[in-house]
Image: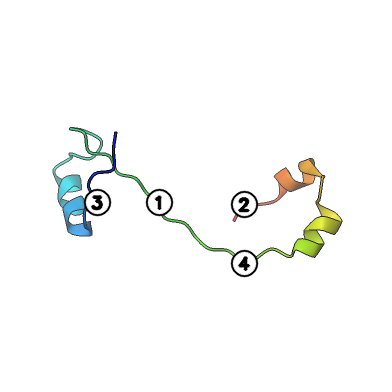
């Protein structure tokens, strides 16, 4: 698999309507993300550093 072509939104819309996505060699990759607030490193070091159970219990952003 290679990333030879990047298509615009209109082309993606047409491919979805024709039910071609994930068939015929066409794959749709979603690379979107949300930027959260920057964590307080001092608080992390004091309260969570090395405490893996507590870190894993934290909600994801």
Residue 14 is situated, as x and y percent measured from the top left of the image, at 15, 50
10 Å neighbourhood of mark 3: few (<14), some, or many (≥20)? few
Q: Which mark is residue 37?
A: 4
| Residue shown at 80% from the left, 63% from the top | 42
Give the secondary structure at mark 1. Answer: loop
Q: Residue 56: horizontal and vertical position, in percent? A: 71, 44
Q: Position of residue 2 (x, y in %)?
A: 28, 38
- State the image quarter where residue 50 is shown: top right
- Residue 51 figure quarter: top right
Q: Which mark is residue 60?
A: 2
* Residue count near mark 4 (Cα–Cα under 10 Å), binned few <14, some 14–19, many ≥20: few
Q: CA distance from mark 4 to mark 2?
A: 12 Å
What residue is disc 3 on?
6
**Which numbered mark, 4 or 3, is in the foreground of this view?**
3
Q: Given this view, does label 4 or label 2 mark the residue nearer the observer?
A: 4
- Sequence-wise first label, 1 or 2: 1
Q: Earlier in the sequence, mark 4 or mark 1?
A: 1
At x 78% / y 46%, what residue is drawn? Answer: 54
Q: Nearer the viewer, mark 3 or mark 1?
A: 3
Nearest to N terminus: mark 4 or mark 2: 4
């Amino acid at each position: 698999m290679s990333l030879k072509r990047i298509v615009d939104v209109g082309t993606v819309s047409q491919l979805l309507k024709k039910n071609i996505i994930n068939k015929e060699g066409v794959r749709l990759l979603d690379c979107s993300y949300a930027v959260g607030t920057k964590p307080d490193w001092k608080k992390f070091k004091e309260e969570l550093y090395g405490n893996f159970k507590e870190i894993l219990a934290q909600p994801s952003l």
